[in-house]
Image (tube, helix red, strand yellow):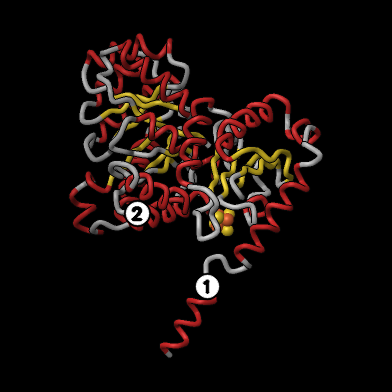
């Protein structure tokens, strides 16, 4: 399962484009697409491809000759939009060349640029997107070209999900997923995640791209994080979990979680860390995390896989969390557990019991709320 992103630089700006490709690869992109919109861009690709840390896809619209030029430049893959390269002889010329050179092609169907006869017949439906992909696929198959990936993107999430489901039932080809023109984050990330996660959990999809109106590094990061969250990729970065806070919170959870995220993201450690607002429920609820901290009576209870290893003053919570995160990444969980402070468990339990005594088992005062509701009845 691979993450794709796309550069926003002019491809003729070789150094600028390469800098962005390196940034995208660092954030989690496995494949990067660059526009090949003129001859200067194709020449830029000739410089970029040999120096890129990841495979390069040339994005082609309207001018099939630029697809031929991109192949001359050595790109690893082409993306063609059937909505704007329409002449079968042009498609076949590109397919024949790609076949001879062993270069795969993605048929990138977009709901916004369907052939008029298809949109007239099917409207903007999953059937229209799939029909367009099948028509294009026919041109490639007519010259014996098989190395095709397909995408059927739409900005409407239910339409996109329906189109990919139908496509997966109809053709046996690798599929590239995306919600096109998803917009700026955070809404754009939500929209794209809704569509792609639904499909990935059904086993549909081979590559993904977040199409965000943002720095493409955000796209690459979101793609990596989605695959990590779904267990489709080994975690390479931080996974910070934090409770939403409630009436039991002993600390400003939003502030502590924010400070921890900032400090840990700078280190880019592959670890799951929990920040919990209270020691009554925190360590238990986050026992699956590699490391966590919960607040209680102006102290922080540091725990490793749910076991308390230290009790520290509240103002040291973030620093201690960072120190132990580094330690777990370099020495492992077992070594961290072996270094648990023998008195910490008893101290932590004493804090927990004292809090339970202060707050009772109903810190959110649910019983009083229910009583009030009943009085209305
Ligand atoms: S009970 Fe504690 S850990 Fe759970 S949400 Fe409330 S403050 Fe956070």
Q: Is residue 221 left or right of residue 160?
A: right
Residue 112 appears anywhere in the view: yes
Residue, disc 1: 366
Residue at 36% x, 42% y is: 138
Above or below for 202 versus 236 = below
**Residue 317 in the figure: left or right of residue 108:** right
Task: Give the residue at mark 2.
Answer: 157
Q: Quarter holding the C terminus?
A: bottom left
Residue at point 48%, 27% (across, down): 30
Which image quarter: residue 103?
Answer: top left
- Between the C-alphas of marks 1 and 2, the distance is 38 Å
Q: Relative to 128, is 197 on the left or the right?
A: right
Whole-percent x, y for residue 108 in the image: 33, 39
Residue nearer the viewer, 367 or 198: 367
Q: Quadrant of ligand 1?
A: bottom right
Of the two numbered discs 1 and 2 on the same chain, state the one appearing first in sequence: 2
**Residue 175, located in which quarter of the rendered image?**
top left
Q: Is residue 210 above or below residue 364?
A: above
**Count of marks placed on residues:** 2
Mark 1 neighbour density, 10 Å: few (under 14) some (14–19) many (20 or more):
few
The residue under the point 42% across, 32% down is: 220
Position of residue 36 relative to residue 116, above or below, is above
User: Is residue 99 at all visible to an observer of this figure?
Assistant: no
Query: Nearer the viewer's eye, disc 1 or disc 2?
Result: 1
Q: Position of residue 118 (x, y in %)?
A: 23, 52
């Amino acid at each position: 399962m691979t993450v794709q992103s796309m550069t926003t630089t002019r491809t003729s700006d070789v150094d600028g484009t390469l800098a962005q490709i390196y940034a995208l690869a660092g954030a989690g992109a496995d494949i990067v697409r660059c526009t090949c919109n003129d001859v200067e861009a194709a020449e830029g690709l000739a410089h970029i491809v040999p120096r890129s840390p990841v495979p390069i896809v040339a994005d082609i619209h309207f001018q099939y000759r630029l697809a031929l030029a991109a192949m001359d430049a050595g790109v690893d893959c082409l993306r063609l939009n059937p909505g704007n390269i329409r002449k079968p002889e042009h498609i076949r010329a590109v397919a024949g060349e790609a076949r001879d050179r062993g270069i795969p092609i993605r048929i990138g169907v977009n709901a916004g640029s369907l052939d008029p006869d298809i949109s007239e017949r099917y409207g903007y439906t999953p059937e229209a997107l799939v029909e367009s992909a099948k028509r294009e696929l026919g041109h490639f198959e007519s010259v014996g070209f098989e190395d095709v990936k397909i995408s059927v993107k739409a900005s409407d999430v239910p339409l996109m999900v329906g189109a990919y489901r139908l496509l997966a039932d109809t053709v046996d080809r690798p599929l590239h997923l995306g919600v096109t023109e998803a917009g700026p984050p955070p809404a754009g990330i939500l929209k794209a995640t809704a569509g792609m996660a639904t499909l990935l959990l059904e086993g549909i999809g081979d590559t993904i791209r977040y199409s965000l109106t943002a720095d493409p590094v955000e796209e690459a990061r979101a793609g990596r994080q989605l695959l990590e969250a779904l267990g489709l990729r080994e975690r390479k970065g931080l996974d910070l979990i934090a409770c939403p806070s409630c009436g039991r919170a002993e600390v400003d959870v939003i502030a502590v979680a924010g400070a921890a995220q900032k400090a840990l993201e700078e280190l880019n450690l592959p670890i799951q860390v929990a920040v919990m607002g209270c020691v009554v429920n925190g360590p238990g609820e986050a026992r699956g995390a590699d490391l966590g901290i919960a607040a209680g009576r102006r102290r922080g209870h540091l725990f490793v896989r749910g076991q308390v290893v230290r009790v520290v003053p509240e103002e040291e919570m973030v620093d201690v969390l960072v120190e132990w995160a580094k330690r777990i990444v370099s020495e492992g969980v077992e070594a961290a557990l072996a270094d648990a402070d023998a008195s910490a468990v008893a101290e932590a339990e004493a804090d927990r019991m004292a809090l339970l005594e202060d707050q009772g088992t109903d810190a959110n005062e649910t019983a009083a709320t229910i009583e009030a509701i009943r009085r209305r009845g």
